[in-house]
Image: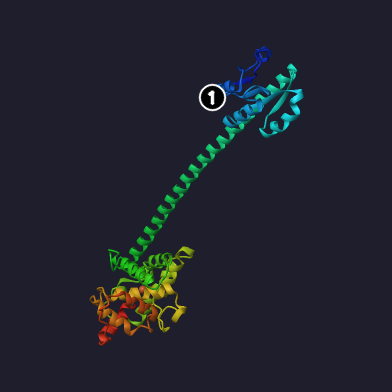
Amino acid sequence: METEKALLIVDDEKNVLNSMKRLLRGAPYRVYTATSAAEGLDLLKRRPVCVAISDHLMPEMDGITFLEAVKQREPDVVRILMTAYGSLENAMAAIKRCRIFEYVTKPWNDAVLKACIDRAFEHHALLAENRRLQQLTREQNEELKTINDDLESLVRTRTSQLEEAVREGILMLAMASEARDDMTGDHIRRIQRITARLCRQLGLDDDTTEEISFASILHDVGKIHIPDHILKKPGPLTDSEFALMQTHTVVGERILGHKPFYRTARQIARHHHERWDGKGYPDGLAGEAIPLPARIVTVADVYDALTHERPYKPAWTTEKALSAMEVFSGKIFDPDIFRAFLALQKPNTDIRPLQFEEEVMHLQHSLR
Ligand SMILES: [Fe+2]
């Protein structure tokens, strides 16, 4: 709603006020008058005013002091000083100090005074418009910020939904590859859990731990390609069967495509049967040439295979599995990783040297 336009005139001489009121009769604004600065300030409290004109020399409070008080209380009121020509010079400094919009000399010229008042109202309208635009800009900025916040939150929600869907898809793929051995998906979840604990024990950061442990569930994805009679064979594999079994590593890597997102999963799928001594497959890599994620998953995978039932063996106790694995630390397993793995076990785990031929054979089965 537009505020009513109003002018306040302050002069201690009533005849001045009357002649100005006559002059401004019919003007498109309301005219208030006051015969003292105190009365003017009081009126300012009660009425909205756009422009204030004050006589300079008045008893009690002079015009400059009055206009300074107006500026303090209502900075947007445009201020005009009327001063006799003779006292103009000593009023100039004060006029500048209290940022008076204009001064008019007494006796005034009617046209000059009216034009001066009109300019003052225009100036006031510009100030009001400027203030309105600033307020509008503030409100629009607030609105934009709210929209941005909402968008960011929406993007976060959608991203997390997408990530969840991708993870769900990966889990389904991993479970499909294990389905002939384990319909429950327990094996891959255990591998993921063991791998995560081992990563943390090795001092890897949270993101790397998450990446490697999640990728670990795809280590045997290539087994989807191995026929049942080989996959579930209880006895030792023939050379040709073993050769076919070995292909699950490279097939797994191929299934996982070329996207950077699956890089760690590809490393694990291809290299989790490499051995520290270089006698593993498919590439015969040795030592640290084997990607770290694959070396970690090798330990987790063998441990889980040994401690759970397989077509060719019953489940072993933790102690027996660790005894068997310790023989191969530095041969199959990265010794540092195996040491970290041992440190994760209960302090009283009884690690004894491997004693039986049969156990070696079972371990080798577990490594296929
Ligand atoms: Fe494997």
Tell me where residue 59 appears, x and y as whole percent. Answer: 64, 22
Q: Which residue is drawn at the image coordinates 47% and 46% (left, top)?
A: 149
Q: Quadrant of ligand 1?
A: bottom left
Q: Is residue 312 visible?
A: no
How would you rate the neighbour count of disc 1 (Cα within 10 Å): few for under 14, some for 14-19, many for 20 or more? few
Helix, strand or loop for disc 1:
helix
> Quick check: 60 above or below 162?
above
Q: Which residue is drawn at the image coordinates 74% and 25% (left, top)?
A: 87
> Quick check: 326 above or below 297?
below
Q: Quadrant of the C terminus?
A: bottom left
Q: Which residue is mark 1?
A: 45
Tell me where residue 213 appears, x and y as whole percent. Answer: 38, 67
Towards the viewer: 84 or 214:
84
Q: Quadrant of the N terminus?
A: top right
> Quick check: 43 above or below 316?
above
Which corner quadrant of the image does residue 335 belong to?
A: bottom left
Towards the viewer: 156 or 313:
156
Which corner quadrant of the image does residue 233 belong to?
A: bottom left
| Horizontal arrangement in the rendering, residue 335 relative to residue 59 (left or right) | left
Towards the viewer: 60 or 286:
60
The residue sitting at the front extreme is 60
> Quick check: 49 above or below 297?
above
Towards the viewer: 82 or 275:
82
Tell me where residue 220 appears, x and y as whole percent. Answer: 36, 70
Q: Which residue is drawn at the image coordinates 23% and 75% (left, top)?
A: 315
* Mark 1 CB near ligand 1 (8 Å cut): no
Q: Is residue 301 visible?
A: yes
Tell me where residue 223 appears, x and y as whole percent. Answer: 36, 70
Figure colour scheme:
rainbow
Amino acid type indicated by mark 1? Lys
